[in-house]
Every structure is written in C-alpha cells, then in structure tokens.
Image (tube, grey):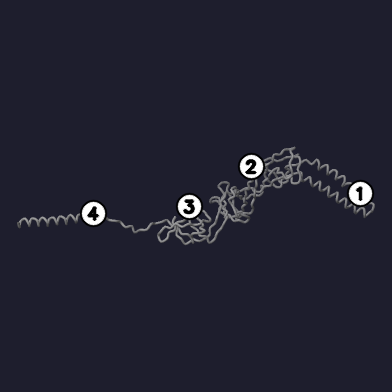
Amino acid sequence: MKKRIFAVMTAAVMSCSLLSACGDEASVDDEIYIPINTSSVNYNTADAYVGTILETVTLDGSVDTPYYTNLSFSLVGGTITELNVHEDQTVSEGDVLVRLSSDELDDEIEVQKVVLDSAQATYDALVAAGDENEAALAAIDLAIEQAEYDNLVKRLDYLTITAPCDGKITSVGNYWVGATVSANSTVCTIVDSSKVYLTVTDNQNQLSNVSFGTKVDIAQGTLVVTTGKVIDTITTTSSDRFSGETTTITSYVIQPDEDVDFEDFGTIQVTFTTLRRDDAVIVPTDAVFETSDGYAVNVLISGTKVQMEVTVGIISGDQTEILSGLDGTETLIL
C-alpha cells in the first residue's frame, strides 16, 4: 500500500514538472509583438501669404510697319483714267497713283475762265475811266468770280490720288482704267514704311484695361530683356462678305524704354499687366483644386489635414489669389 502511494506521488511530481517546462516553452514561442506607430504623416506644404498679385497676358510681337492709310476719292467719284498701282508696289511720297476723268470739270473751268476774264476787263475799264464807285462794285464781282474759278481748279486735286508717304501698296481694289469708282470707296491701301515699331496684335481679344501708357515687359529669349509702354492702339474692322459678321482686331504699338536691336530670329514676347491687386491672399496654384461646389484647399491644422472651401480670384502662373476662405496665415498641403 505504501509503495503504491509513493508511486502516485512521484508521478504527480513529474507531471507537474513537465507541465511547468511546457508552460515556459509556450510563453517564449507564442508571444505576439504589436508595433505602435508614434510618427506623424509628412506632408509637402507651403504657406499662404498676403502680397501683390498681377494678372498678365503674354503675346508674340513683331517689328513691323503698323501704320497704313486707305486711299480713296474723298469728295467725288468718277471714271478712272490712270491707275499706277499694284500690290506689293513700293512708292514714294507724291507719286500719282490713281486719276479720274476731269472732262466735265475742265469744261466748267473753261466757262468760268471766260466769266472771270470778263469781270477783270470790266473792272479794268472802270478804273481807267476813273469811276471809283462803279469800280468798287466791279472789284467785288471780280473777287467773287476769282474765288469760283479757284474753287473749280482746286477740285482738280480731288480727282487725283497721290502717295501721302514713302511706303508699300498692300492691297488694291478691283478697279481698272475705265472703271467707275464712288466717293469714299477705298481704291488701295498704303503702309508707311518710315514708321517701324514693335507691334502686338490681339487676335483673340485677350487684353483688357490696356491703353496709352500701359507698361509691358519685353523679351526675346535671353538676347533682349527690357521694358516698354504702349504708345498707340490701331483698331482694324472687317466684315465677312458672306455672313456680314464684323470682326474687330486691335494692334498695340510698343515703344521700348531703351534702344534695343531685335534679332531676325527668335520670338519676341510682350507681357501686359492687365490687373494688379495689392494686399491679396496668395497661395500656390498647385494647392487649389476643384470640387463639386467650386474650389478648395487642404489646410494643415495641428497636424491634421482639413479641406476648406475657397473663392478664387486672379490666377497668375504658379500663384493664385484667394478672395475668401483664407486669411493668409495658413499652411497648405500641396
């Protein structure tokens, strides 16, 4: 009986020892490590600020002869008897370009010359006779007839178009010797070759608030970098012959602030400042994105990204004006 009890106790002790050993082994092999992330998210950020922002438009310019004149018979029409122009023709100031028939006017001048000579003879006779009163009246008649004669002769000038300047004929109407032309109808167009300027043409009507004296930045690559100003505007209006739609194109004549020689190669870029806003809240354009309701930015507040709705104003390249939604002290997430 004692031997049996001892055997049972021995077995129990060994069993406890084995269980203890097994427990230790499980606690080492089955332990699970849970990592704890204590670092914050790193954002690419930029600060909003208050400053001046400019709205600009950059257009290509060219060194050109922007001044032209449409030539016409301003007071009378008639039949063309002489036509000395063609497109791309170079002419000199005073050259006769177009002449109208003067047959009717020549007849009027001839008749008036007879009347004038008669008035002159009457006046001379009265002066010779010593009749002062009658001679004074005759002098008045003579002055009237002389003025009429001079007026008729002067009208001959209106039957001739001469070149008003040295230049080039850029276009000629559909006229020929013997054709009839109406008063004020453009016969040809001449460009003044003596007036060469840097010129910018706004074909898409992108410019606004641009007038005489507007400052511009001028660049032809790295060869020419300077400033200038608008010294004139030239507006051209044309109508489509089929639709009747009228198109207006404005060209701006630019005077650089310093003497520069533009190269024959390389684009000349002229940048106009069309709007300036001081004390504006400015953010990087990359920070602004569209939403279903408009525009928004992501602002970093105490390490947390917060989306805020904003109203956008001037967009100038990599800078954007915020009209509402920010005060200029925020840190933005790009």
Which residue was labeled with disc 4?
30
Q: Are marks 2 and 1 in contact (CB under 8 Å)?
A: no
Which residue was labeled with disc 3?
292
> Which is more toward the observer, 279 or 310?
310
Three-letter amino acid code at the position of disc 4: Asp
**Quadrant location of the N terminus in the rendered image:** bottom left
SS at mark 4 in the image: loop
Outermost residue toward the right? 129
Earlier residue among tags 4 and 1: 4
Q: Position of residue 239 (x, y in %)?
A: 65, 44
Three-letter amino acid code at the position of disc 3: Ser
The quarter holding residue 80 reads: top right
Q: Nearer the viewer, mark 2 or mark 3?
A: 3
Three-letter amino acid code at the position of disc 2: Ser
Q: Are marks 1 and 3 in contact (CB under 8 Å)?
A: no
SS at mark 1 in the image: helix
Q: Are marks 2 and 3 in contact (CB under 8 Å)?
A: no
Q: Position of residue 153 (x, y in %)?
A: 81, 46
Which residue was labeled with disc 2?
243
Which residue was labeled with disc 1?
122
Q: Nearer the viewer, mark 4 or mark 1?
A: 4
Earlier residue among tags 1 and 3: 1
Earlier residue among tags 2 and 1: 1
Earlier residue among tags 4 and 2: 4
Q: CA distance from mark 4 to mark 2?
A: 88 Å
Q: CA distance from mark 4 to mark 1?
A: 145 Å
Question: Is residue 200 rendered to the left or right of residue 26?
Answer: right
The quarter holding residue 187 reads: top right
> Which is more toward the observer, 200 or 13?
13
| Position above or below: 1 against 187 | below
Q: Position of residue 74 (x, y in %)?
A: 74, 46
